[in-house]
Amino acid sequence: MDPQAASTAGGSKRARVLGEESAANPRKSKKTREENVETRRDEEFWFEDGSIALVARDVEFRVYKRVLADHSAVFADMFSLPQPESDSSASAKSCPTVDLDDSPEDLRHILRALFPRRDATFIPLELKEPTYHVLSAYARLGHKYQIDGLLGPALAWLKKHYTADFDSWCAQESYPFDEDSSHAVGVVNIARLTQSHAILPTALVVCCDALCSRSLLFGVEREDGTLEILDDDDLVRCVSAKRELIRASTKAVLAAFAPFDPPGCEHFGACQQEILKLLRPYFVENLEVITREHLFSPWESFVDDGLLGQVSICDECVEHLAERVRSEQMKVWERLPEILDLGEIEGWPSSPDPDDAVRHRTPLKDIGCVCSLLLNLPGVIWTSKGRERFRRVLAPWQSFRLPSPSPRQSSI
């Protein structure tokens, strides 16, 4: 019997299972299940005295019905119904056989949790760094078969690492699953499947920021060789949001570096000149927008390491600059559901009152002031070509007039 049918019979309406082969969307999988395929025993989970045989594609697992029923409401419902005879495998005639549409790899991860072997180590998910493949299997199959003991911890781990809390997100040294950030595609799909919407903003940000166009369009490979892809709506969200995220991140940095006069600074003019020197390489050597792998990095990551030791900025200005960068980034963070066209996300920090935001936001003229001061740094002469390139990069914030070239000591 199909366990999904048993779930329906038991009164539980389930969402579509990720990875389920579908003729309507053939690119969901590179492999298809063949009818009457010859099966082979799984080397890890084959108990001679087992009472149920689970067949996943061409791999057969013999385990115990009672253990499955204790952990899974779906299997419990299924085993309560009359079992049809099956001759799926000659070696399994002594016990019922259930055909599953899951991959052997996913099923094996689930069975390792439900049937721990002698050398198993019992460490809660929150105390270790599980692989994506383990978490994915726990979340997807835990949802499908209603194994709450696996689904709950998996979602808790994902919500902790794809967090709605700005400070917790910034405290992470890298994106979750940094060895392969492309797993964010699967995290988005898990969030959709389980309706864990609070995971979506950061998971989609990673998709926008860390994935190449090919991975976004054609998917990333799962453990079993099939492809994990975003649905069309989320793909459109990523493509549409990429530019706005870059623009918002750039604007946040420029607004933070705009001239300011913190209490306690006794060398305002000198400190401001030194601060502006930190941004100069972006316009002298590299005119790409000011963004980094992690969109919400601390202020030091936006400047060249070599320059930090060459400038002299008082402690008050450094502290105030860090606070300004954080404040501007927080505004972007609060807007993530809007930028990603997700609507209202429960648990996501809300933006302040719009009128209050207008009163306190950094005016574009201040960003223009930053650019004007950069153009007048000592030791720089702006050529016509350099000025034009600079104008294109800062087009969204050109509320200032570029000054006429003046003699300097070196040229850009």
Image (cartoon, grey):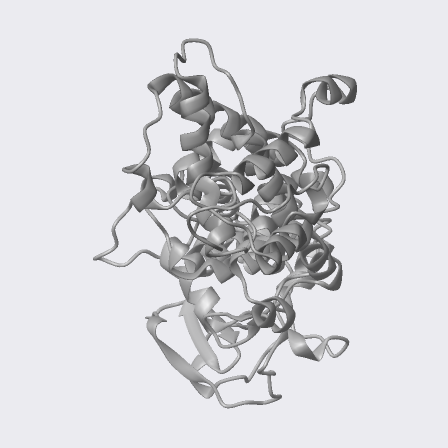
Quarter of the image where one finds residue 186: bottom right
Q: Residue at x 49, y 77 (%)?
A: 225
Quarter of the image where one finds residue 9: bottom right
Q: Residue at x 37, y 39 (%)?
A: 126
> Position of 271 compared to 363: left or right?
left
Between 341 and 254, the residue placed more toward the observer is: 254
Which residue appears farthest toward the left when viewing the image? 119
Between 214 and 319, the residue placed more toward the observer is: 319
User: Is any part of residue 405 visible from this angle?
Assistant: yes
Q: Residue at x 41, y 24 (%)?
A: 271
Query: Which image quadrant: the N terminus?
Result: bottom right
Vertical placement of 153 versus 359: above or below? Answer: below
Vertical placement of 331 versus 80: above or below? Answer: above
Vertical placement of 276 versus 123: above or below? Answer: above
Quarter of the image where one finds residue 255: top right
* Residue 114: image location, x then y, percent: 40, 54
